[in-house]
Amino acid sequence: MVGSTLKPEPMPVKWPKWIDSIPAKFKPLLVSAYEINDHSPEVNLDLVEWALPRVDHTSLKPTHSEGERITRRMVEEAGSPRPVLGICMNGFPRIVKLLSGQIKKYPDIRLAFTSNFPHGDLPAVEAADFIHNIANHIPQDVTNPRDIDSVIDYGLWLEILKSKGTARKAKLTEFCEKLLAEGDACQVHNFLWKVIQKANVHVMADKPYESLYLSSVVSMLCGADYVKTCTGMAAKSPYNDVVAADESRVENMIPMFAAIADFNQGRVLEEVAEMSEHAKELFQDIMEVAKELEIDLDLSKPAQRVRHPKISGGQRNEVDVARIRYLVKEMMGPEFLDSIIIGASDRLRLRLLEYIHENDPNCGFTLEDIRARKKRDDLPPHLSGLGPS
């Protein structure tokens, strides 16, 4: 069965530093989420029927020469036999033009393109220009809703964590100015803006929970509509020795969900008051830089514009999405089950479709329908083990 040999991970031991940094009030949620398995009552047809329309069908590895074949396949997969939420691909001009032209027959499927990806290290002007360039390559007759998925400059963020005084404020200003430039570009072109936190890189901070929480807050201060966990890709040198794959795990979802919930409900100040002295000092600098940059948001009051989560990287099967759904309900509220986005390669989409076929005799499609386009020689390397033998 597609994906069935990929067992969900047990309670993690790879990075105990993550676990240690999570506040005690969230430890029971961490344990309960990891206790969910394929025999749990939470894993059922209702879950899978909920998850599939929340999926951003993602492929971020095609070269320019492969673009037409892969974009055509992505569109057909996203539209049938059950539609997903959107398609997410690299924001290269050729890919943008091809995908935009082919997606028109499914006008409700979202177009999502990565920008400043995967390391977030373009200067502010170039980062904004990249988004403008994406917009300029989408034909005017394409009406699909559209998104930008950009990455925080995580190398700069880790430098910020180690800095003090005027040096830290200067780096914070640079970090925020880049985000503001990207946010302004998204607003000009009516893009929904999702900011990727490169979540696993935060394990290199002294307190990973506080680092990811605060970077999420800064992203929202700078205008992010969605805060997103991971890129699914390795970090750049020198961080790649630690982060060989940036994938979402329960422990890095928790600080992001907490930050979004607190931001929406005006609780950020209360949460920061419970953090370390280092985090409190950093937050004070964040707020001073925000004031200097004329970011006028009162974090002691509920947000006027609600922010939302996207989970991406490493989601492979129904147990993974059950854990996401559990955490969203417990930490943010059931109303966010309608807005959460799950970014994943075709492995997740295939497994969810297969689960529906196994458990709903009236689903209206066959396994052949699911796998019809999945010839092994038509797959990028990361999916080459799937499909009929």
Image: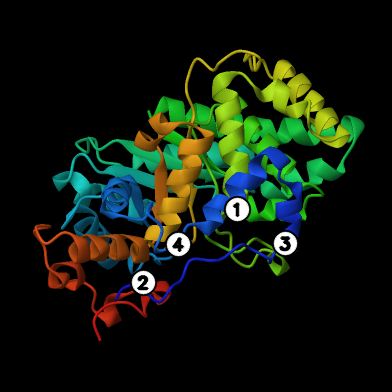
Name the foreground residue: 356 vs 101: 356
Residue at (71, 64) in percent of width and height: 237
Q: Which of marks 4 and 1 precedes in the sequence?
A: 1
The amino acid type, in three-letter code, at marker 1 is: Val
Instruction: Looking at this view, name the residue that lies furthest to the right.
Output: 165
- Label of residue 380 in the image: none
Q: Nearer the viewer, mark 2 or mark 1?
A: 1
Q: Which of marks 2 and 4 precedes in the sequence?
A: 2
**How much space separates mark 4 and mark 3, taking CA atoms?**
32 Å
In contact (CB < 8 Å): disc 1 and disc 4: no
Percent position of residue 313, x then y: 49, 57
Q: Secondary structure at mark 2?
A: loop
Label 1: which residue?
Answer: 31
Residue at (37, 54) in percent of width and height: 41
Tell me the crowding category of disc 4: few under 14, some 14 to 19, or many 20 or more residues within 10 angstroms, Cα based. some
Label 4: which residue?
Answer: 37
Q: Secondary structure at mark 3?
A: helix
Tell me if residue 12 comes above or below residue 386 in the rendering. above
